[in-house]
Image (spheres, grey):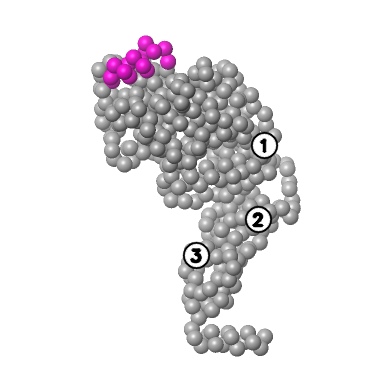
Amino acid sequence: MSFSATIESPRGAKWVLALAALVLALAQPALALETTARAALMVDLGSGTLLFEKNADQEIPPASLSKLMTLAVIFDELRKGSVRLDESFPVSENAWRTGGAASGGSTMFLPLNSQVTLADLIKGIAIQSGNDATIVAAEGIAGSVPAFAEMMNRKARELGLTHSHFVNPHGLPDPQQYVSARDLVTLASYLIREFPEQYPLFSEEEFTFNGITQRSRNPLLPLGADGLKTGHTAEAGYGLVASVKDDTGRRIVFALTGMKSVQERAEQARAMMTAGLRGFESIVVAKAGESLGEVPVRNGAEESVPVRPGGEIRFLQPRGEGGGPVTHEIVPLGIVDAPVPEGRRVAQLRVLQGGKVLREEPLFAARAVEEASLLQRIQNTVLGHFR
């Protein structure tokens, strides 16, 4: 079984990069589950625990799942102040012909040469999966679809998506456009963590524009999920990226791709959601801010310093597996010399179960320890010689 750490980091991409690196480092999934999906990955967002994976790094056509990256770029531009929600963009002939009603794909039914606010375009992308909406947004923000695709690829590199490349904002087939299940989960986690003001859009079940009401295709919304997106093309099959929280606030995020029908997608998504929420139990090793012990300090006004974790440390294990009691030990990072400022990393917490090291976590000084005075140092030296 593999475990990972609770991630506590500043707002921005650093958190997602840490999650991506962490998930990549994990070995085999802990969940005994089968799926007909071509590729799949599921994580517990709070602890970063890998719950299941299947062909997670296989490069696959994204279909409309690429719209998650389109929205990530849009949300980034909103946060920067480069665009506004009430800003209007024109519906070009390219957007109307390529993504409009005549195209035969998912569409927002935007009228040619009309003006549409970015707020409506975002809903048209997130809820209706409108291809025309993505083109209008891309042209309005970047000037052209290729320029916007480059923004998508820059964002992918920033987030550490190593098996993704984007050519357009809607996901219509292109041999140079691909994603992986692992990258999709990392991307979804970024949207959830970084844009709490925008994320509720993914849970809206319908949107009406220009007198036409369309419902979200996400089959898990009526069952308690709060996002994120479905996708389908003949090449990609039926796919889904979803997230759901249980009553305790524990959130799982998963991606499934390459299924053969809407029904199969719904069935496999329900099974994955149920297994992720009910198949595991959470074990808390340490609470945030909790003092776990002390580490000796050389030449300090105090002989030792209490240590604490950077945040809550917990992991998940399959229910009923029972690997024995969980214990821990503190391992100092060599000799700790005074002065020691509060918050300095001074030790590692080694978490064990049944004699097996599950993982190691950094420990930090819970308070400052000043350097000992000259008299104290002399006394300590003398006492040390006669002990």
Instruction: Describe the element under mark 1 as helix, strand or loop.
Output: loop
Residue 350 occupies which quadrant of the picture? bottom right
Which residue is rendered at x = 37% and y = 33% of the image? Answer: 150
Identity of the residue furthest to the top in this view: 102
Q: Amino acid at mark 3?
A: Arg
Q: Residue at x 51, y 74 (%)?
A: 338
Query: In the drawing, what numbered circle is on residue 31?
Result: 1
Q: CA distance from mark 3 to mark 2?
A: 20 Å
The residue beneath circle 2 is 351
Counting from the top left corner in percent of width and height, residue 239 is at 53, 24
Residue density around tag 2, few if under 14, some if 14–19, many if 20 or more, within 10 Å: some
Give residue 344's mark.
Answer: 3
Q: Would residue 16 be counted in the magenta stretch?
A: no
The dot on residue 219 is none
How far, Cα to Cα, is label 1 from label 3?
37 Å
Residue drawn at (64%, 27%) of the image:
35
Residue 20 in the image: above or below residue 332: above
Which quadrant of the rendered structure holds the C terminus? bottom right
- Given residues 4 and 314, the one toward you in this image is 4
Eyeballing the image, is 373 above or below 248? below
Count of residue discs: 3
Q: Earlier in the sequence, mark 1 or mark 3?
A: 1
Neighbours of disc 3 within 10 Å: few (<14), some (14-19), many (20+): some
Residues drawn in magenta: 91-105
Q: Is residue 288 left or right of residue 350?
A: left
Please name the predominant secondary structure of the magenta segment in the image.
helix
SS state under label 2:
strand
Residue at far front of view: 176
Q: Looking at the picture, does residue 263 appear above or below residue 5?
A: above
User: Which amino acid lies under the numbered mark 1 shown in the image of this protein?
Assistant: Leu
Dot 2 amino acid type = Val
